[in-house]
Amino acid sequence: MAKKRSETKSSQAYKLVSDQAVRIAIWTGQASAAADQLKVKTKVVDTFVPEKLERTVLSILHTVTPKVRTKMSQGETSFTAAEVIGMAMAVAEDLPYTTPQEQVGLMMVAKTLMDSLQTWIAREGEAKLGGKKTKSSSVY
């Protein structure tokens, strides 16, 4: 009976991690569509400056492109929207197939990538739409 419970817990954990990977992938697809719509996929995402954790994790993921892995290992800090989106998708792809300890690191990296992209895309969208706010206290 105890074995059945552990198998159930294990399968529940795998389902939760898989569901999170799907959510990251869906979000990444939406970010990609937004970047396409704004025509900014080749622009550098200045809000993403990889720290040691991101560099370590992303440079060893097999689903990250060789170009990005090389840039990570060489300490580069300029990554295009397409590259950052690709990194987030790579995290989503690898997440279900890693150990629980690795999953924690991947989730932290995913959060950093997603937060950076969200901030950057929102700012780019506002700039493209001419929605830069002025600091005026006048009300008409």
Image (cartoon, grey):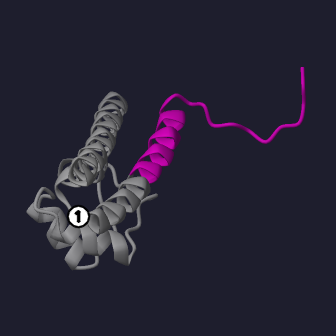
Is 68 part of what is drawn in magenta?
no
Drawn side of residue 103 relative to residue 120, left or right: left
Element under label 1?
loop
Mark 1: which amino acid?
Answer: Thr
Return the x and y of residue 85 as percentages of the image width and height.
Answer: 28, 47
Q: How many marks?
A: 1
Residue range corresponding to the magenta coloring: 114-140
Q: Is residue 42 above or below residue 105?
A: above
Q: Is residue 18 left or right of residue 64?
A: right
Considering every residue shown, the one lying at the far top of the view is 140
| Nearer to us in this view, 70 or 12 | 12
Q: Is residue 112 above or below residue 86?
A: below
Rate crowding at label 1 as few (under 14), some (14 to 19) or many (20 or more) other CA atoms within 10 Å. Answer: few
The residue lying toward the viewer, choosing from 11 and 29, is 11
Q: Nearer the viewer, residue 136 or 14?
A: 14
The residue under the point 63% across, 37% down is 132
Q: Residue at x 21, y 77 (%)?
A: 73
**Quadrant holding the C terminus:** top right
Residue on which the image places disc 1: 99
**Which quadrant would residue 64 be assigned to in this image?**
bottom left
x, y percentage for residue 53?
A: 35, 73
Which residue is located at x 40 percent, y 61 percent? 108
In the image, residue 133 lies at what x, y percent? 69, 37
Seen from this angle, which residue lies furthest front?
Answer: 1
* Residue 70 position in % (x across, y down): 15, 72
